[in-house]
Image (spheres, rainbow, N blue to C red):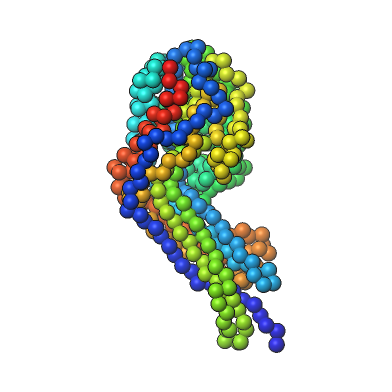
Amino acid sequence: MRTKIFVTAAFSILVFASQLHAELPSAAKVVMTDSSASALAKTKRVAITNVMVSFQASAGGEKTNTSGLFAAKSDASSSLQMPEMDTKLLADITDAIYAQLKADLQANGFEVVPEATVLASPSYQKMIKAVGITNPSKFANFNGDVMLVGASGLKPYLPYNAETGKFGASPKSLIKGWVTTSWGVKSSTEGGPTSTGTGEAYELPGLEVALAKDLNANLVKATYVVTLGSAKANVERFTGTHQDIHGNTGFSSTHTGSAFAQAGLLAGQSRIAFRTPAASTKGESASLGYMANFGSNAAAAKDGDVVVTLAESLAGGTDFFSVSGGEKAAGGLEKFLLGKALGGTGADTQFEFTATIADPAAYRTEVVGMIKQARRDMLALVKQ
């Protein structure tokens, strides 16, 4: 009799919900991104044109493959998602960051152009007409789904993709319905951004230069990426052998998924960018030289001719999150082979974990505190 090979899986679910509050370092590690503060010396006037916080709504999506005899495979994936987000809370956090930015710029020797003057500029209105997006907007980046939230007094906009590298140009979505993907990734928010639009916004650097000249000031854009945590999947193969009721020999495997929710601030993408009146109208580009520093996030963003960014990510607290979830779908060898034959890419076992903010006040304090620390050390590098 021919011996048949079959796969069985024992599914394990791990959820980590730490009650520890992470202590932030006394100083954030920051670095100039292929630039020098000397370019800001011609004027102390600065005009804030964009303050945006990208709140990650998903993380993970990691997939583990394991090969066995006769090329049989078993795989698992895991993701952490926060599909329900309190946009009023996120807007309050962003507005607090905007107010602090103005105060800190002044404390560091800059003259801040009044917001009303910026908004009234024909150059600003032309720029916003070309690239402005709805506030807030759902979108996606290289790490997953995101809620883009801008300061209430300003119209938010995204930089030209060439200035963000693959982090902005290679978005991925893990939450069903968060974005649409026909003709490129598109926000499900009316008036939100599209990957095609940001990829074609080659005129944006020139519009910013024109605005800088119009205001006789260096433009300031503050962007922060607030991370959600991580999710992992694992497959352990050949943990034992057994026979089914027909006497066929098989192998067993154990699929596990885990998730860890933790607030953080992402290096390389959390930054303060200045666009001076003397900047190139063709824009900048994300340097490949930063790939070693920022790992899978690739190049640090460079959406100005003077940019200062986090050199290392900040890890914040965990105790204001609640995490739940488990196995979404499972299938054995038959489903796996059928899926591959039809071009499917889904894992045999998928774990989905859902995070919620159980303590909004504590979360607000943590995020505002992390960004305050990062901004303090970033501005120290460009102090006038």
Between 280 and 344, the one lying in front of the other is 280
Q: In the rendering, at what x and y percent does residue 84 appear?
A: 39, 49
Residue 217 or residue 298, whichever sits in front: 298
Residue located at (43% from left, 41% from top): 314
Residue occupying image coordinates x 52% and y 32%: 158
Residue 263 placement: quadrant: top left
Residue at position x 61%, y 58% in the image: 345
- The part of the image, by quadrant, that contains residue 142 is top right
Residue 366: percent from left, percent from top = 34, 41
| Residue 211 place in picture, x, y as percent | 51, 17
Instruction: Please identify the residue farthest to the front as the structure is shown.
Output: 26
Q: Is residue 195 above or below residue 11?
A: above
Q: Is residue 15 above or below residue 263?
A: below
Q: Is residue 41 above or below residue 135?
A: above
At horizontal 63% and vertical 23% (from top left) the residue drawn is 282
Total number of numbered discs in the rendering: 0
| Residue 50 at least partly seen | no
User: In what quadrant of the picture does the C terminus appear?
Assistant: top left
Regarding residue 223, the answer to whether it shows in the image is: yes
- Horizontal side of 72 relative to 157 (left or right) equals right
Q: Position of residue 197 (x, y in %)?
A: 58, 34
